[in-house]
Amino acid sequence: MKKNKFYKNLFKSVSYFSAIMLLVFCLLLGFFESLNYGKNYGWILLIISALLIILFFLIGFYWIFQKVIIDENGIKIVFKNKVINNHKWDEIVSIKKVDLFRCRALEIKFVDGSKIHLDDRKSIVKIIKEYSQVDIVNGYF
């Protein structure tokens, strides 16, 4: 029994965290610049920086730490060892490569009309091609 686990939203999490860290870097530059002046309120920038990072993990915790398990039985989406979604391979209608929030993703549609999005990573595409009978359609423009 071959199981493969991946973080479901890795690309989106990395890109959003990078944007937040760029903003935090700018705030820290402002803090260090504020040290050159007499009356110093630069500590507010430190608090804002810390709050941005904390809010990223608090708000995004559910999406950041979801995992997808792809094996011969199908695709499972798991959060903290609890199965959120479970679909078998014969339930898949189509698999299409799409842009989702400026990140490349695989859109997998199922018979019941639901769909999931997985990061378009070589390892995920490879394992899906290994188990799925449905061809992956290139939907990029």
Image (spheres, rainbow, N blue to C red):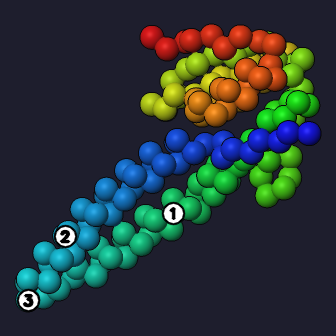
Residue at point 74%, 25% (across, down): 128
Of residues 51 and 71, which is closer to you in this image? 71
Name the spot of residue 34 as percent of width and height, x first: 14, 78
The 10 Å Cα crowd at callout 2, few under 14, some 14 to 19, many 20 or more, is some
| Mark 2 residue type | Gly
Q: Which residue is mark 2?
A: 30
**Residue position for label 3:** 38
Measure the C-alpha gap from mark 1 to mark 2: 21 Å
**Gap in Å between the C-alphas at discs 2 and 3?**
15 Å
Discs 2, 3 touching: Cβ within 8 Å: no
Q: Position of residue 48 (x, y in %)?
A: 36, 70
Q: Is residue 48 left or right of residue 70?
A: left
Q: Is residue 23 above or below residue 126?
A: below
Identified by mark 3, the residue type is Gly
Q: Name which quarter of the figure residue 3 lies in.
A: top right
Q: Quadrant of residue 84?
A: top right
Image quadrant holding the N terminus, namely: top right
Percent from the top left, x then y, of residue 133?
81, 13
Say above or below: 77 vs 65: above
Of all residues, the one furthest to the bottom in this rendering is 38
Residue marked by disc 1:
55
How many other residues sit within 10 Å of disc 1, few (<14), some (14-19) or many (≥20)? few
